[in-house]
Image (cartoon, rainbow, N blue to C red):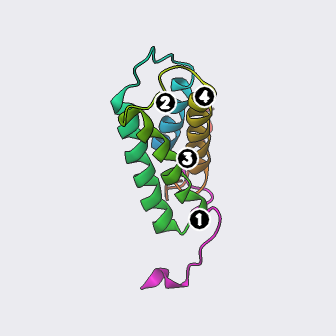
């Protein structure tokens, strides 16, 4: 296989001039925005499912690009098990609620600019004139 020569790195192997991942950036924005939304006693199930799905997707991308930090999202997403199992961590805006959402947003922002970059070069700016 061709990728047997690629070694594991903290941020993985990726095209440094590639486009920033809009999808990973969007996930970061969604969780950052959710940081300031008061759940009023009931946390949305779709946010927990989104955390699990995106962490698995990031883990898969990390495996493909050999990025060690890409696996941080998987254990971090396990915090979202609490509201699904009837826990109270996300019933109000608490330190746990704030930290979990902020950390997940920052992790995905980091992912968007490192190993999840697209293997497509940025478009060259055209001069108007």
Give the residue number, with chain letter if any, for mark 1. Answer: 68
Alpha-carbon distance for marks 4 and 1?
Answer: 25 Å
Quick one: label 1, few (<14), some, or many (20+) residues within 10 Å? some
Alpha-carbon distance for marks 2 and 4?
Answer: 13 Å
What residue lies at 37% left-to-right and 26% top-to-bottom?
44
Between discs 2 and 1, the one toward the N terminus = 2
The disc placed on residue 30 is 2
Question: Start and end of the magenta stretch?
Answer: 1-19
Quick one: label 2, few (<14), some, or many (20+) residues within 10 Å? some
Magenta stretch contains residue 9: yes
What residue lies at 51% left-to-right and 16% top-to-bottom?
38
Asked if disc 2 and disc 4 are in contact, CB closer than 8 Å, the reply is no
Q: Nearer the viewer, mark 2 or mark 4?
A: 4
Alpha-carbon distance for marks 2 and 3?
Answer: 17 Å
Between discs 3 and 4, the one toward the N terminus = 3
Alpha-carbon distance for marks 3 and 4?
Answer: 26 Å
Can you say whether 56 is above or below 10 in the image?
above
Q: Is 122 placed left or right of 81 in the picture?
A: right
Alpha-carbon distance for marks 2 and 1?
Answer: 24 Å
Can you say whether 116 is above or below 36 in the image?
below
Q: Position of residue 8 (x, y in %)?
A: 59, 73
Give the residue number, with chain letter if any, for mark 3. Answer: 20
């Amino acid at each position: 296989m061709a990728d047997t020569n690629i070694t594991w790195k903290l941020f993985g192997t990726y095209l440094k001039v590639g486009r920033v991942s809009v999808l990973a950036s969007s996930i970061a924005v969604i969780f950052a925005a959710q940081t300031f939304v008061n759940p009023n006693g009931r946390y949305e199930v779709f946010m927990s499912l989104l955390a699990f799905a995106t962490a698995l997707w990031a883990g898969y991308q990390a495996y493909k690009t050999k990025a060690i930090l890409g696996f941080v999202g998987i254990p971090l997403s396990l915090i979202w098990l609490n509201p699904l199992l009837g826990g109270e961590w996300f019933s109000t805006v608490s330190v746990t609620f704030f930290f979990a959402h902020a950390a997940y947003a920052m992790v995905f922002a980091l992912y968007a600019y490192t190993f999840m970059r697209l293997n497509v070069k940025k478009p060259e700016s055209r001069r108007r004139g």
